[in-house]
Image: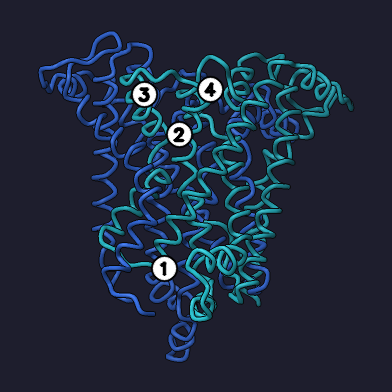
Chain colours: A cyan, B blue
Amino acid sequence: MKQGTGLGVYAVIYLVFLYAPILILPVFALNDSQVVAFPLKGFTTRWFGEMWADANLRSALLRSLVIAFSTATIATILGLFAARASVRYRFPGKPAAMGLIMLPMVLPDIVVAMALLIVLLSLSVPLSMLTIIMGHVLLCMPFAVAILTSAFQSLDRSLEEAALDLGESRAATFRLIILPLVMPGIIASFLICFTISIDEFVLANFLGSGKPVLSVYIFGQFRFPAKVPSMLALGTLLVLFSIILLGIAEYFRRRGVAKAGGKDSGGFL
Amino acid sequence: MAQTPSSEARAGLKLISPPALYAILMLAAPLATVLVYSVLTGERGRVSLPLTLENYYDLVTRPVYSALMFRSLTVSFFVTAATVLLAYPIAYFVSFHVAPSRKALWLFLITIPFWTSYIIRVALWRTILGYDGIFDSVVMGLGITDTQPNILSNGVLSIIITLAHAYAPFAVLPIFVSLEKVDRSLLEAGQDLGESRLMTFLRVTLPLSLPGVVAAVLIVFIPTVGDYVTPELIGGGKTPMIANLMEVAMLKQRDQALGSAIAVAAMTIVALISVFFVLWNKRYLGGRK
């Protein structure tokens, strides 16, 4: 394809632009200098050591993991309800309900954060990890719904009808037939929500108490130039971690599509 | 299946109620509260009656608000233009020139950077663009200039670069989806009838893919107007946008009424622009199934 080659070159340049910052991350995380600039000074792993020795960072990480796990679980369960209802049933008010559920995807984070914050403050709810989870669930639900909707869409409805005809109850049909078939979508949704929650900053910052979660901690550290290299080391690990999680999520998403006999039409969203 | 419409509706409503209730309690109710707060009087972390338009009057009369709103809109405009223009060829390439079995892999590659810590990506841009940073050392090392370009000193430009990079995948996906829906036989028909490749693209492919372009524009434009992190980290707070002003009003001045008014005003302006944009492209949207 002749006219494809020019576009192909452009596509590669585009990918390089997209990945440039991520590729720079490990280079300077392993560079033996506090200043993030070329030329490189030499190889060191001390920034990783310095990062790991930071007790505040470890407790921030622990908080983030707890929040991300809870968020991913709740958002995926709520997403299951919404996706199932949206794919399988017709009911009044469906566009409004789905629109509201998907709204946080386009609403600026700061608006969601501020709106929740003034309600929490007016009800005198103390800010804590719980309030961050409440916000993160709201933010992650649209992504869970998007992934699970495609999982339910590729489901063959005759399988469900066959089980009902053979005398299974509705609950048993859901548990024995539908759930296993959408399981890859559930896992993908869980992992995506987990990743979003770990990375999220705005809600975590405004809805959290004085004890920072990981993203808020990183944000604070970048004000001190001396801390930048160890934050880059942490960033390298976080990026590796996200890529692994996303790889697993993508694997399950594709397996889900293949299992249901559908044709793979693209990535998340 | 032996299901009457009403029992189907009931089953659907029962299923949707947990997530819908959650969204109503955690999103719709708070947004309604913001709307109400915006017409109250705010002071030291509390709001009180009577209803007043004072907050909106402040927004209109004090130049700082319109200046920052204008800056936010300008930044979003350039970010949207850059991401969509750069994304279109990629979406076209993946849709038309990549083998079907490898499309998912390409999309996966394009979306990965989006899922990596935004804070770290923004901070990286700061070290890339800053004085004697990576960009400066590369440009000077190649002998292109003798002095540090120090792009970071231009707050708005740095914010645009960082945001355009961050939202790139968001623009590719909707355009790709609409290009995938373009009926390939229409293109062959165009060329069989003697149109050049370029004319076929301009008269068939481009109009048919416009719904995806419109979606991409909205999905980039709306959240970037309200971006908070990038100005905070990139400009060190020296180049604030409207979201930063919202934060200052809410948390520093503890004037929740004024903060709410800023939020409502900003979202109204964004919504109006979005609606006009959609109407402007209306003839390309809808119609065909």
Q: Secondary structure at mark 3?
A: helix
Residue that badge 1 annotates:
A88
Label 4 amino acid? Ser
How far, Cα to Cα, is label 3 from label 4?
A: 38 Å
Q: Residues within 10 Å of mark 1 (few under 14, many from 20)?
A: some
Residue plotted at (34% across, 44% down):
B21
Instruction: Indicate whether A230 appears above or below B145.
Output: above
Q: Nearer the viewer, residue B2 or A64?
A: B2
Residue that badge 3 annotates:
A120
Q: Residues within 10 Å of mark 2 (few under 14, many from 20)?
A: many
Q: Secondary structure at mark 2?
A: helix
Q: Nearer the viewer, residue B75 or A261?
A: A261
- Does A167 sit left or right of B137 as displayed? left
Image location (x, y in percent) of residue B165: 56, 42
- For marks 4 and 2, give the one nearer the viewer: 2
Discs 1 and 2 lie in a common subunit = yes
Q: Which mark is residue A218?
A: none
Residue plotted at (29% across, 22% down):
B259
- Which chain letter matches label 3? A
**Proximity of marks 1 and 4: CB atoms separated by less than 8 Å:** no
Label 1 amino acid? Arg
Residue that badge 2 annotates:
A135
Instruction: Indicate whether B97 appears above or below A91.
Output: below
**Proximity of marks 3 and 1: CB atoms separated by less than 8 Å:** no
Image location (x, y in percent) of residue B40: 17, 20
Discs 3 and 4 lie in a common subunit = no
Q: Residues within 10 Å of mark 4 (few under 14, many from 20)?
A: some
